[in-house]
Amino acid sequence: MRFCARLLLVLFLLASPMMAQAETAKAVPVSHEQVQLSFAPLVKSAAPAVVNIYTRKVVRQRAFSPFADDPFFQYFFGGAMPQGPSRQRLENSLGSGVIVRGDGVIVTSNHVTEGADEITVVLADRREFEAKVALTDAHADLAVLRIDTKGEVLPFLQLKDSDEAEVGDMVLAIGDPFGVGQTVTSGIISALARTTTDINDLNYFIQTDAAINPGNSGGALVTMDGKLVGINTAIYSRDGGNMGIGFAVPSNMVRAVLASVANGGKQIARPWTGINGQAVTADVAKSLGLSRPVGLLVNAIHSASPALKAGLKIGDVIVAVNGKPVDDPAAFAYRIATLSSGTSVELELMRGGKNMKISFALIVPPETPAPDETLIKEQSPLKGATLANLSPAICQAYDLRQAEKGVVLVKIDEGSVAARLGFEKGDLILQVNEAKIESVQDVVSALKSRSARGWRLVIDRKDQRVNLFFGD
């Protein structure tokens, strides 16, 4: 018993300093700063640079006959039912934007302003401005607007290097969800380089759990140093509301788009490498001697590619661009898209189990052969479609897989035969009847040599080959 008593006394004496420290740590705050823990100072500096965007678009609709599906009337009208007069309705939409330059340059999501006839920007202090579109980039889902500030310098957000962001960093999302007014939510960066979302063509995002809802599109994702790290663009949702999974376009992509505006561009011209590739699977990685599935496996190189001249070969695996890791094809496309034509790029490769590097200057996509845009006016399944010769510039514009030769649909007149038959912009014409197609003139000639039964067309739509037959 004496031993136990002595042991308890020793433990009490040892614990006393720790208990005193704990009591000290729990002391009553003695200053306002010790009591207050708030994002308010950050919000006060960042929120005035976030705006509301209201758009108006006139939508024209044609009234169809109530007998359009009646076989009796279709017989007499040859399947083409008469249509009633067109009607107009006003379509309104709502989004957010971020002032990135004090002279009135604003970045938002392209889907917020796409097709709008009128764009109104409302500042945080409720002043309204008419906005003009300076540049659009549908591939990255970004748009740049301008407002006339009459010389006034507006509050704006500086861009952060999004490559410095880390998973776990705290962020604020600022925007106008559901049109209730400017709203601030907080969270963390949940993931970086998210490439499996299929939100836009470049498909490379910052993921956050900060609450983002409809109306937040185009708003700001702000880091704790008050800088813009992303433009909020989409959410994952089952019911249209926030589920803690939101996506933002990285600020480095925004920087590349703004550089085009500074150079006077109306449409962004991204650099071109002429490289096609595929993701590296576990089986492919094992066969190539890679420690894990990573990078872009090169499976095609255009003959005009600067990378080909620098020594790139089919079968190489690109694992980094300018020292930045490349995990998959989407990451490679993003890294190239954030660079400018004329600048040098360094690719880190794996070839035969060995590391190597190549460097070359990025170029704009060549427009060779010439487009030779041609509207098909003669009676055929393609009547009303405008065709163009395939070139690297056309491939980039329509997000097509690189090909040396071919013909693509670049425009389809509303209500035309081609539109009614379901042809789409970006369709590649591979064959008409028995003729292989390599140029627009090949299509024009082949359409004139219609067979007795009609036309047979082979097209490529998003890497899917489709056989079509149109008879009498």
Image: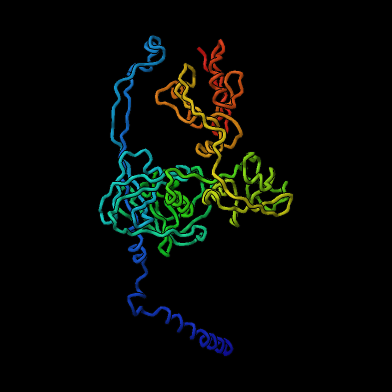
Question: Residue 205, image x and y in percent?
Answer: 49, 50
Q: Is residue 285 left or right of residue 33?
A: right
Q: Is residue 168 left or right of residue 61?
A: right
Nearer to the camera, 45 or 257: 257
Q: Is residue 356 above or below residue 80?
A: below
Q: Is residue 225 above or below residue 56?
A: below
Q: Is residue 461 above or below residue 355?
A: above
Question: Residue 105, image x and y in percent?
Answer: 36, 52
Query: In this figure, which colouring scheme has been used for the structure?
Result: rainbow
Question: Residue 340, image x and y in percent?
Answer: 52, 50
The residue located at (60%, 57%) in the rendering is: 323
Question: Residue 248, image x and y in percent?
Answer: 45, 51
The residue located at (36%, 48%) in the rendering is: 145
Nearer to the camera, 170 or 217: 217
Q: Is residue 341 left or right of residue 104?
A: right
The residue located at (34%, 63%) in the rendering is: 45
Q: Taking the image as drawn, is residue 223 in sight?
A: yes
Q: Is residue 62 left or right of residue 253?
A: left
Residue located farthest toward the right when viewing the structure as drawn: 352
Q: Taking the image as drawn, is residue 180 in sight?
A: no
Quarter occupied by the N terminus: bottom right
